Amino acid sequence: MFGSALPATVDLGLNDLHSVLITYIVSRQRQERCLLCLEDIGSEETQSSDQEIASLLKKFAIEPEQLLLQSEQKHRYQHFAHTLMSQRKAFACLCVAENPQTPSQDSLCHNSCFEHQEMVAQQIKEQKLPYVIRIKKAEEEISFVDLIQGKVSVAPERIGAPVLLRSDGNPSPLFASACDDMLSNTSLRVCAMRHLDSTPGEIHIKQSLGYTAKTDYAHLPAIHAGEAAADDDTPLSIRQLLEEGFLPDAIINYLLLAGNTHPAEHFTLPNAVAWFDLSTLSPDPIKFDKETLQHLNRRHLEAMDDRSLSTLFGFADADIGRLLKLHLGEADTISALERRIKAIFSPKRCDGDTAGQMQTLATLICEAPMIDAFEDFVQYLVTQSGIEEARLLTLLRLLITATPDGPRLEDIYPLISPYITEIARYTP
């Protein structure tokens, strides 16, 4: 089983999708099950969040075999914590500060509470004091070889005595993650870089519980928005990118290119399953490059079937798809193309002397017979309107595209001639 964890939010970050994507690819390469754990305990977005996340991932053709809700495993986490307490491998602690504590503070809790458990238990019982359950400090260094970051060794003092169960009985994310690995027998966990510091604590918990099966870890390089970042806390939102008009295929393409060696610049997810190699990923942080994403998005739009592209804008016409592709030099997202196509199919407006001539052209086009060749269409309008050809072409561009520049009219006309009376509308 290959696993990755997701926050219980309907808006995933780019780093979260990166982890899920690579988990999914490697699971397909090794023909093993893909498990995604949803960190929904204590979340305000638990209602339907699993369905919404599954729906979002489906846009990226990612369909894991299992989406595990940690809220449904809560009783198991509690059982494991109390088992550790009964074995004196965990202890009740009166330090219940909501903010995460540092390993040095954990050590103080360990020294003051673990060594005096009978007294602590009596205080809890008599005074009904809130308490947390902490793991006993490791007795020796925790080491593992990360598949991307290399060897990681952490002294017991740096791990401390992290919380297993909080004062409300809910597990800490660290404890839930460790238990999930055990319950699902996870052989590879792909994580965002922000989880690297907590991994030794997870290993310590699993060792304390007597779990001996090996779990490999791969902590992906952080993708961040700024010039420099210590971690991968970033506002980069998947839903935001989709709303801006980036294709899921282009986002996948970008994520798999970032910090990686690859045989081609432009590819889809099935292509990547064939060549992706986890060992070729660089451990270095990655600065998000929107220009590269825009370039890749343009490449994927260019590669789309013309009719399929048109359906994104309410058509089922290959010619409209070709019309959209003419605008890819200046519009490289779905949103930008939508603005172009709406401008073409909306009534046009002008002021001053131009208004009368635009109205004349619109009327002539509405009454004209079907004319196939663009040159013949222009000559018909020149003859009927008496407007000099150069001037007429300028007006015609505004009447058709609503902009003074863009693709050549002789390239546009054959694609929109069946719609010409709908397009060439003028509103005073």
Image (cartoon, rainbow, N blue to C red):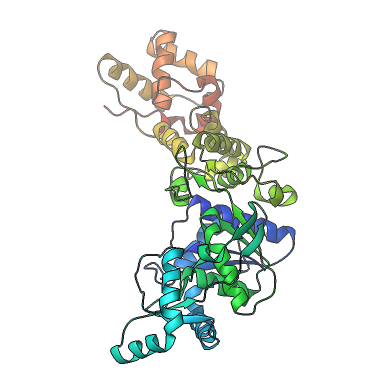
Q: Residue at point 32% right, 16% down?
A: 357
Tell me: residue 40, above or below residue 13: below
Q: Residue at point 45% right, 36% down?
A: 336
User: Can I make out residue 8 in this image?
Assistant: no
The one nearer the camera, 366 or 256, is 256
Tell me: residue 293, above or below residue 395: below
Q: Residue at point 55% right, 87% down?
A: 87
Q: Residue at point 46% right, 71% down?
A: 172
Residue 83 position, x and y percent, is: 54, 86
The one nearer the camera, 258 or 396, is 258
Q: From the image, which quarter does the C terminus lie in?
A: top left
Residue 387 position, x and y percent, is: 38, 10
Tell me: residue 82, above or below residue 32: below
Q: Is residue 55 left or right of residue 9?
A: right
The one nearer the camera, 79 or 356, is 79
The one nearer the camera, 39 or 402, is 39
Q: From the image, which quarter does the N terminus lie in?
A: bottom right
Residue 306 position, x and y percent, is: 60, 39
